Every structure is written in C-alpha cells, then in structure tokens.
Image: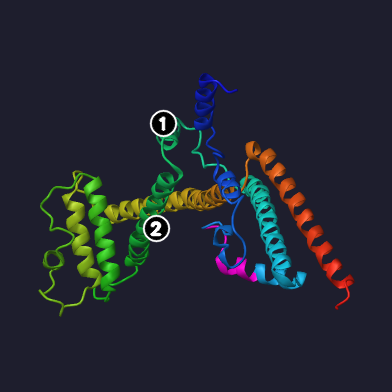
Amino acid sequence: MTSERQRLANRRNALKSTGPKTVAGKALMRLNAVRHGLRGAPVVVPGLEAPADWERFRADMVSSLSPVGPLEETLAERAAGLLWRLRRVERFESLSVAADQVALEIPARPRSTESAIDQLLDEDEDRMTDEEFLADREASVADARATVEKYCPARDFATGLSDLGDEAPVDPAGTLAFLAACSDHAEDEGADDTLSDIEDEEGLRQIAGLAPGPGAAWTAGAVRKVLGAFAAATKKKQAPARFLKAVLGSLDYWIKDAETEIELHAPEADALRQRIVLSGAVARARRAGVGDAAAGHIARYEGHLQRQLSATLSELARLQQGRVATPKP
C-alpha cells in the first residue's frame, strides 16, 4: 500500500515532469493524442502547417486505402494522421540539416585593418549587433557617395575653368558646386567671415558683379571674381591661380577619400546584409527543426509512429481481406 509520504513524493515529481522544453519537441509531442478526420484540426501545427494541406493529404490517403464501413474508415483516418506526423518529423530533420548547411555559408563579420586607430574602432564595432554595424556601414557609404556626387561636378568645372574666356557662359549648377568647394577649402585654410554665405546666391552674384535676380547669367569672369574673393579671405591671402590649384587638390583628395570609403565599406555592408539574412534563416530553421539534444527523443517518437502505422495498416488490411473473402449471403 502506498504511504502518504510516497504519495507526496509522487506529486512533487509530477510537477517536475513538464514535458518537452524545445519548440520542436512541444510541436511534436503535444499532438500525440489528437483526433483525426473532419474533427482533426489539432493535427496541424499552427505556423508550420496549413489546415488546407492536411485536409488534402487526409482525403488522398483515405481515398487510396479504399475503406468500407465505419471501422475501416476510422483505421484509414488514423493511418493518414500517422503518415502526416511522420512527414512532419522528416521535415524537422531536413530543416536541421539545412540549417547546418546554411550556417557554413554565413560570411565572417568584417574587420578593420590592423592600424592602431582601426583597432580602437574594432572595440566599438565588437559591441555592436550585426544590424547596428550594418547601419553604421550603410551611413558611411551613403555619406561617401554624397561627397562624390557633390564634388565631382565641382572638379570637372574647376578643371575646365582656365580654358574659358571671361565672357564665356558657364553652367549655373556647376558654378554653384565649384563655389561651394571653394568655400569649403577656404574654411579649411582659415578664411575670415567677411564672405557671403555660400547658400546666399544673391550675395555671391553681388561679389561677382552680376545684376541681382536670375536674369544675368554666370560667366567665367564672374566666377573668377568670386574665386579671387575666397582666395583673398584666406589667412595667407593666396593669389587666385594658386587658390584654384589648391582647391583642385582638395577636390581630388576629398573625392579619392570618399571613393576609398565606398570601396572598403560597400562590400562590408553587402557581407553584413548576407550575414543577417542567412543568420535569420538558420535561426528560423533551427527553431522549427530539432537540435542534437532532441534528436534521440525524435528518433524514438518516429519509431513509435512507424509501429503504430504498421499495426494500423495491418489491421485495415486484415479487415479488407476478410470482407473480400466472405461471400455475400
């Protein structure tokens, strides 16, 4: 006879028996005693299987077994449910294998070079998630591309300015891009604040000696006047020709630096995107699949299903053979 002490111990042990811990284990084991047939909605694992797929599969399996009468129909429904579960087990195992294969394709996280400053940057990057690191690299590439788009037209304009006569008309967009570059270089050279703001086109037109308003077109000579004003505003009071040469040098440096940034960080951003996508795919597959710890349990469960299926089909075959062998009265 069981003692009161033993009954209490049994209850405590029962509280610890909470069943499977993993998503895969719960998805598989929770359906051990489901109903079949038209009331067999629990056969389907929400989020992993579609009820419509199960109904098509069930109808096909039952039809192929050709049951006659309630007993044979019940056995055929049971066989369909067991086959559906076996397919699920195989799918979980396939997802686990696929996850391992995809994991091998995940690129390593990009690393900076071995310079001292890059090693300091590495420490910050190591604290970032892949998503944060990608956002940093995308911002870096976007800024670099904006720099190239800003300064390339200015460099093209500056390169051809010396070949133009003072009265030659010039492209307004190229003019403003070039004068913006002159302003940036003058600021780097410690220019005073007597010049008009580069955003104030009317102020620049006044320096150039042009009439106010959009009526008077920019000319090469007008651009040179503004160029001379920028040159005179620098600490060294540079000559216009020397200032123009220095602006071209700065433009070359800014563009080259931005292109190097794009060359380095754009592939890193691509690798990070691939890493994030593949890591997500692996995580989803592993959540739906089975891990090493659950593999033994799943194998035993699969064997259990196989035995149940074999017994069900044998019983169905016995009934059908008996029905065929029994002559009608």
**Main secondary structure of the magenta stretch:** helix
Q: Quadrant of the C terminus?
A: bottom right
How far from the left and from the top, in percent, is residue 244? 29, 56
Q: Which residues are magenta?
A: 47-56
Residue at image location 89% in from the left, 71% down from the top: 325
Q: In this view of the protein, which residue sits in the foreground, 25 or 261?
A: 25
* Disc 2 crowd, CA 10 A, few/some/many (<14, 14-19, 20+): some
Residue 145 numbered tag: 2
Residue at image location 67% in from the left, 51% down from the top: 89
Residue type highlighted by circle 2? Arg
Residue at image location 70% in from the left, 71% down from the top: 60
Residue 218 numbered tag: none
Q: In this view of the protein, which residue sits in the foreground, 104 or 14?
A: 14
Q: Residue furthest bottom?
A: 215
Taking 96 as reference, is 60 above or below it? below
Q: Is residue 175 left or right of residue 320?
A: left
Query: Label 1: which residue?
Result: 120
Q: Is residue 96 left or right of residue 21?
A: right
How far from the left and from the top, in percent, is residue 273? 50, 52
Q: Is residue 86 left or right of residue 45?
A: right
Residue type highlighted by circle 1? Leu
* 253 part of magenta stretch: no
Q: In this view of the protein, which residue sits in the foreground, 270 or 128?
A: 128
Task: Compare marks 1 and 2 and give the one earlier in the sequence.
Answer: 1
Numbered marks: total: 2
Residue at image location 45% in from the left, 35% down from the top: 126
- Tag in front: 1 or 2: 1
